[in-house]
Amino acid sequence: MISVTDTAAVKVKQLIESEASEAPLFLRVAVRPGGCSGMSYEMFFDSERADDDMVQQYGEVSVVVDAQSAQHLAGATLDFKDGLQGAGFTINNPNAQRTCGCGQSFS
């Protein structure tokens, strides 16, 4: 299961609160085939869970990972950076043997 820094959890909470949704939302993190290195990360807000989804609570934020993605995300950390060079979420994944220049795909 992926871990989430406090900074990232606060930002996710802010983004969820800005959504106009009647259903409770959580952050889904997944790994999908694609990208220039073979696998790519996918993050989006979701309101539906499958029976085999893994759920972890970080403050008021629920993070959900499907069982297949969990094996690629074990030990990974989701962080949020906000600096002069730009802002955004980053995933530090010790399972990645190589990553592409954009940081969005790995193998």
Image (tube, rainbow, N blue to C red):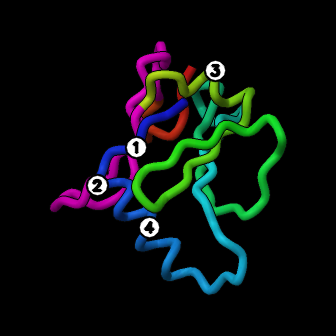
- Residue 60 within the segment the image draws in magenta: no
Question: In the figure, is residue 42 to the left or right of 60?
Answer: right
Q: Residues within 10 Å of mark 2 (few under 14, many from 20)?
A: some
Locate residue 22: give its quadrant: bottom right
Q: What element carries label 4?
A: helix
Q: Distance between the residues labelled 4 and 3?
A: 25 Å
Q: Position of residue 37 (x, y in %)?
A: 58, 26
Among numbered discs 1 and 4, the one appearing first in the sequence:
1
Among numbered discs 3 and 2, the one appearing first in the sequence:
2
- Report the residue at 33% width, 53% height from top: 80
Q: How far apart are marks 3 and 2 (CA)?
A: 24 Å
Answer above or below: position of 57 versus 33.
below
Question: Disc 1 marks which amino acid?
Answer: Val
Question: Disc 4 marks which amino acid?
Answer: Lys
Q: Position of residue 24 (x, y in %)?
A: 66, 71
Among numbered discs 3 and 1, the one appearing first in the sequence:
1
Q: What element carries label 3?
A: helix
Q: Where is residue 29 in the image (x, y as percent from the top left)?
A: 60, 45
Q: What stretch is highlighted in magenta?
A: 77-99
Locate residue 92: give its quadrant: top left
Image quarter hosting the N terminus? top right
Q: Main secondary structure of the magenta part?
A: strand
Residue found at the far left of this picture:
84
